[in-house]
Amino acid sequence: MEDDSLLAEANDHFHDECGVFGIFGRQDAAAIVTLGLHALQHRGQEAAGIVSSDGTQVYAHRALGLVQDIFSAPVLAKLPGSRAIGHVRYSTAGGSHIKNAQPICIDYAHGSIAVAHNGNLTNADEIRHRLELAGSIFQTSSDTEVIVHLIARSRESSTVDRVADALRQTKGAFSLMVLTPHEVIAVRDPWGFRPLALGRLKDAYVFASEPVAFELIAADFLRDVEPGEMVVVDKAGLRSLKPFEREPAKMCVFEYVYFARPDATLGGINVYEARKRMGRALAVEAGVDADVVIPVPDSGVPAALGYAEQAKLPFELGLIRSHYVGRTFIEPESSIRHFGVKLKLSPNRSIIQGKRVVVIDDSIVRGTTSRKIVKMLRDSGAREVHLRISSPPINWPCFYGVDTPSRSELIASSHSLEEIARYVTADSVGYLRPESLHKAVGGTGGKGFCDACFTGDYPVAFEHPAHRRQLSLVI
Amino acid sequence: MEDDSLLAEANDHFHDECGVFGIFGRQDAAAIVTLGLHALQHRGQEAAGIVSSDGTQVYAHRALGLVQDIFSAPVLAKLPGSRAIGHVRYSTAGGSHIKNAQPICIDYAHGSIAVAHNGNLTNADEIRHRLELAGSIFQTSSDTEVIVHLIARSRESSTVDRVADALRQTKGAFSLMVLTPHEVIAVRDPWGFRPLALGRLKDAYVFASEPVAFELIAADFLRDVEPGEMVVVDKAGLRSLKPFEREPAKMCVFEYVYFARPDATLGGINVYEARKRMGRALAVEAGVDADVVIPVPDSGVPAALGYAEQAKLPFELGLIRSHYVGRTFIEPESSIRHFGVKLKLSPNRSIIQGKRVVVIDDSIVRGTTSRKIVKMLRDSGAREVHLRISSPPINWPCFYGVDTPSRSELIASSHSLEEIARYVTADSVGYLRPESLHKAVGGTGGKGFCDACFTGDYPVAFEHPAHRRQLSLVI
Amino acid sequence: MEDDSLLAEANDHFHDECGVFGIFGRQDAAAIVTLGLHALQHRGQEAAGIVSSDGTQVYAHRALGLVQDIFSAPVLAKLPGSRAIGHVRYSTAGGSHIKNAQPICIDYAHGSIAVAHNGNLTNADEIRHRLELAGSIFQTSSDTEVIVHLIARSRESSTVDRVADALRQTKGAFSLMVLTPHEVIAVRDPWGFRPLALGRLKDAYVFASEPVAFELIAADFLRDVEPGEMVVVDKAGLRSLKPFEREPAKMCVFEYVYFARPDATLGGINVYEARKRMGRALAVEAGVDADVVIPVPDSGVPAALGYAEQAKLPFELGLIRSHYVGRTFIEPESSIRHFGVKLKLSPNRSIIQGKRVVVIDDSIVRGTTSRKIVKMLRDSGAREVHLRISSPPINWPCFYGVDTPSRSELIASSHSLEEIARYVTADSVGYLRPESLHKAVGGTGGKGFCDACFTGDYPVAFEHPAHRRQLSLVI
Amino acid sequence: MEDDSLLAEANDHFHDECGVFGIFGRQDAAAIVTLGLHALQHRGQEAAGIVSSDGTQVYAHRALGLVQDIFSAPVLAKLPGSRAIGHVRYSTAGGSHIKNAQPICIDYAHGSIAVAHNGNLTNADEIRHRLELAGSIFQTSSDTEVIVHLIARSRESSTVDRVADALRQTKGAFSLMVLTPHEVIAVRDPWGFRPLALGRLKDAYVFASEPVAFELIAADFLRDVEPGEMVVVDKAGLRSLKPFEREPAKMCVFEYVYFARPDATLGGINVYEARKRMGRALAVEAGVDADVVIPVPDSGVPAALGYAEQAKLPFELGLIRSHYVGRTFIEPESSIRHFGVKLKLSPNRSIIQGKRVVVIDDSIVRGTTSRKIVKMLRDSGAREVHLRISSPPINWPCFYGVDTPSRSELIASSHSLEEIARYVTADSVGYLRPESLHKAVGGTGGKGFCDACFTGDYPVAFEHPAHRRQLSLVI
């Protein structure tokens, strides 16, 4: 996928989503969460937060920035206790504000409770409107606060029942961590849109958006939290509940294409291997005569390796990525801004000059960044430039946790392959077919994935006018 | 090479050196220098500075941190003028201090002058002692200030002659940018230890440690500044002087092994291609039966590609590098610190498990990081781990601009191959022979390179007791 | 009164209360509020906030610190509109936190509303408990948020009616400013515990805790907002409502003794003149043979002038106040801390040496600061030190907006005059009688003031156990 | 004197000068210096610095801001040793820069040395020019660096002799503290322009610009350092040298009028008492029929008390000073700026209305602030306003350490009494005669004071053209 910082720069973004982490049963819980969030940092760089509890009180710290910059020793010293949950939040193009940082933490009639959320509800606005009429006061515009208010209003007698009661009123995607002084709860929506894994660190249970976070802390991966499952951990141990009506599994297929780390294993499938298979399938379906295969680093590397193997072409680093632009996108200075992609990627002329180049990226959103990359390759002497994408054309916005632009801004929704090639100035553009993607990911035909962004086949209906507006091709 | 942040973390570092950039003849000179320094950021992340001039006054800004964080629009607004020079400085493990940031800028009897320096003098302490006895006051312990004082004390009548007079009194390595309100001067020591390139941006002349910096600003590479050459640019245009006695060319070969960016072309040789040739030679000289070749990212990637091609083994990303550790090394929190290499690199289990792995790195300094990497691969199920290094054993400290540890701390200076393998817990360790390195770099036998760190063959003598201490194996 | 920063240092404090300001009808409303709050800064130094509106949206900024440091031009640029309210908050010894800064600003079913509050409710905890059981979520522990929730829950159809409905459910002290995009409302509780004045600035109406704030902005003082009055200003102009049951007037008498600025005129009475009358009465009631009268600066100066006039003794500055300690109390460094009062006050030896000194302060809370001052005078050679206090002994905590210690910590509640003199090491201690204070303030016998801190005669009952605990002499 | 922050606001300033402090022989030397500088804070609020030594190394910290904000516990922890010197620097209207902070600390051929300086040299530019031609490099434009270079260039064999050698080459005013790892040296120029006192704190010797600094740390005042004396303290104890030619004593009389704290005793004379005598003399010389005497706080208070006593008129606080403007002057926001004096001083209407007011200030520089104060009194209803100044008209700039405007900007140098009265809109203006000032200060006719600012009688000649320019009435 067009890299996030490039994209932000180019106003051509497909926002990352969020990451959550939780632990129950280890004295330095907040320090473990810090490490877990660090391993999930690629899922959100805008803000991070941790709420811990010592069984009596809860302690919270949230800030804008990267995990490693926020959770210094003095901060961790103020987050005591053996249970904690955490959250990393994606960057929004508009106003990044500390107010939107998670976990949300409140005091209500039954004590303190904190919630960290990955995903998006499709009926949040309707619920919010109903609650405000009854006198509720909202602090943010986030879906998560809606969940919190539903919990506070619930008449159920236990935390577990109040959380289930609240979530039953919602529709859409949630992989949720909940903390009270007495328990940590992990819940995944009935479709399982976003990932959530369960692990074990000695006597403690841990939860993470991706099991790569377990690797860092040397925890063992046990299993995925199942769609529709609520896992409750307290002093009595772990128990599993199924408080929701069953729905067909609809894990986000884009996790495999772009979001997840290459070393992650989600739903039993290794992401790196899946991406290599996408690359191989791409070489079969959309192969082209060429001299060299180069990836758009870093996300395009596994698919490019797969493509090169399949096509028996040399794989080379034709674009060098700078390690020092991680943060420009937060507040790009206008004087540097127009240098755009060049700040992030640099062409390796000796590889490109005079060659017919296949350049592999994972996806195209608006096309502006791809255009810059193709131009860079041409300026470096490429004889031909063929852009190959290791997933299908993105045609539809996501309403389940990925902050996509409106349909009218998605280049593929209104352009043919030839038009896209002309726009990005490539000799040719090729994509993977949806069924090939499913096959590359799942090995067996891809049942059980949400691919609405490619197909428009939305598993959960939505009513909100704003959503419909986003689907229109006319703006 | 063991990556700098890993190394700092592991107290196993081989400091980067510095980068310099200069321009004469373009209105937004400081903005161009900002971009140039950004492209050279890999040569130094501790501090950055720019001094500009509008022909009358000079304007300076220096700060700790990354180029992109320091040179915001308001800062650039205070650096007017059509000429400017800049500097990025490497991270020191001990006290990073703003006082040591460059360019150094002074007022003296003949006006204002600024100096930015990459390299190290071998007789700086002797000169400093002599000047102090005559009443000079030094603000820093840097070699650069020694040069500045020699310029201030020179009786010559022009800036050019004073600079030449000053540098003739020094011994050792310098790639130097000098700025006065009227001219920009680039000088390289007679041996040409450190690189320095000359380019053209429309009507302006530009200088940079590596020509990759020209790529970003769309300047044309003209040629390298030659060893012993002084290039002066002023309103009258460009002229070249040769104010020093001629010496044999001794460009640092380690620039090709590790320092330079892979897309750089130094002395007419593309670094990426040179590294691939090192990898191929390594496969020939130190090949081993294995299932997969993996690089230590990012510096080991080209050599690993070359090794895999030569050995006809699959190349895979067995270690995933996090993009979010760029800065931990500055002030690592103890609570996170012991997680060491794992914060930076994560094993891709599905690639490693059950395999005989060849892992390619560019060099070993103390061996502590290599040991952690090998352990990580074993913990992930590697059946065998063979460590291959795309350069010879580092046996000797550098006195020409690379901040190396004493000889006694260099693992190769006192350990056999078998002992190193045992220490890093690898099944085997293999290096490249010096002559093979020369051949891989130069294609023709390697005349003209300094390889003192591998061979102990120091081109410039040194007298200082501290230097001799560093050579001792006994501490 | 023992000065606030001294007191904090000495853990001997009597917290300041808060100040509010509001304006409707002038384009640079937030800038005017900034000036108004600056003039009220003595009422609270911990935090300040302003909420403005342009008739459509509301804009808020709150921060810890002094008004002049918070409301810079760029901040004011983000607070547009012709209506605004503001708040300065007192320093709490424990955790000062931005969360507690006011005005509180929320979005609810009927739009945006902001509230700034001076005073304390006596039934806040009961209301809060009731609302939480019904599902309300509180962000802070402040009384003000209770009012906000009551407004959000009210079924009344207009803002004015919702505010009145909310406040009718409360008991205790409030001088309140409310802002919506359409109106600014000022309300004072039926007893009028805390002051609130109404003024006019050309076409705009202004409100302030003390009319001295009008002086700075060159507004005209019109009248005090009356106890139990609600003044509403909107585009239609100003109207006055009386939505509460009538209660006897109970303005806080301590405003005259310490809180208000000497140049303020509250309830038609000039504070400086009232303090001079207290000093004169003190000389009559508790006069003593002496050589010189000195004030504890700055709050003791007017009373000392009155005492000196009445006693026909010279008035001298025997204690010099440093201007540079305004902020130490926020985070006193332990290395300096034990120097205590000496950092703030310095004895003027030439005035004190060999003299019988009458030192005038406005009040004693715990006595620790008085003890240090007396010691300082003795160390400077005073022959006798007579401490005279221009108000009666503080015997009871306040529950109407002043953050006093528990009864057991008030020295006067458990010590006789002689015991206090012995504790502070003075030759004698003298106070003013309550009826003399009333007379000095009001001129006519003092009806209409709350003097509960002196007499224990609380005008509004309270039920909360925490309150009762504070009244106990046993801890 | 017109108060410094008012003055800065009004661009009508008479800069404060600096303060120095030193100690030898106590383990927490830097902490003691912190307290000493705090007591001298009124002499300079721009920047503060401390250099300490443990007998081997020297440790330095300098920063912009107030002493209490700079020297926190962690900073003090980095300033170990039993000897230390410190400096507070006045605010300059133009660019306050950390570079100009003192003490200046250098390494030179004979080790480390630090210098803190109060005063101004009249031949600094000449010396500087000479040294630069010989190759010296200057970092700042301060006189102090000139002294440091002279020390570094001196051929003398001991620190004491090098310091004496350096100072013998200078002309003008210096009260100097010098620190090396082995000794602390205090020197005062032969005329004794600026004060410097010697004290004892148990086994340690202490030095301070004003002995009030001894009061805070409970040290005993021993005596003033004499004009032309050099006091050296090292492990062997204290010795006094007289290395300069003798000159007539010329202590700055303005220290008594404005600079020194009222509780200071300089040259055996208590400042508060001297100011009261000035006020009494003023009532005799320039008395006027009136109802009330009010000071411009705080510097005018003692003189107003003296005037009121002599004139048998009531003394009242007619102007109330805000405690919260200490720092606005550093960077006043334009939105608040035009409120000028009103932010700092507020009229106490009830005192002023309908009265004939005598308002006492210590001096007038440009007259702009006085004009605002008179206007404020008139706006508050004063029937008559008579401005009385407790010193003579300031007619001439100072070249010995006070940063005064040029002669052409001093209102008294070109306006008659009547013209000044008209400009400031007062009914009358009156000053003290120079001989009366001398008498009030010294009691006996005032021999031994420099009063050049009143009389133009400069004790030390000066050659520099810039100085002559400042004397011109034409600009």
Image: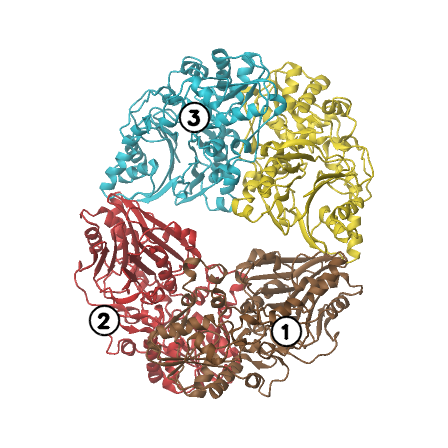
Chain colours: A yellow, B cyan, C brown, D red
A104 lies above or below D466: above
Tag 3: residue type? Val
Which of labels 2 and 1 is toward the front?
1
Chain where mark 3 sits = B
Q: Is residue D193 left or right of residue D424?
A: left
Bin the neighbour count of mark 3 within 10 Å (Cα to Cα): few under 14, some 14-19, many 20 and up: many
Residue B365 numbered mark, or none: 3
Chain where mark 2 sits = D
Bin the neighbour count of mark 1 within 10 Å (Cα to Cα): few under 14, some 14-19, many 20 and up: many
Residue where numbered disc 2 is placed: D448
Q: CA distance from mark 3 to mark 2?
A: 72 Å
* Residue B207 location (% of width, % of height): 43, 31
| Quadrant (top left/top right/bottom left/bottom right) for the C terminus of chain A | top right
Residue where numbered disc 1 is placed: C196
Q: Is label 2 on the same chain as label 1?
A: no
**CB of mark 3 within 8 Å of CB of mark 2?**
no
Q: Which residue is at 27% across, 46% downward?
A: D132
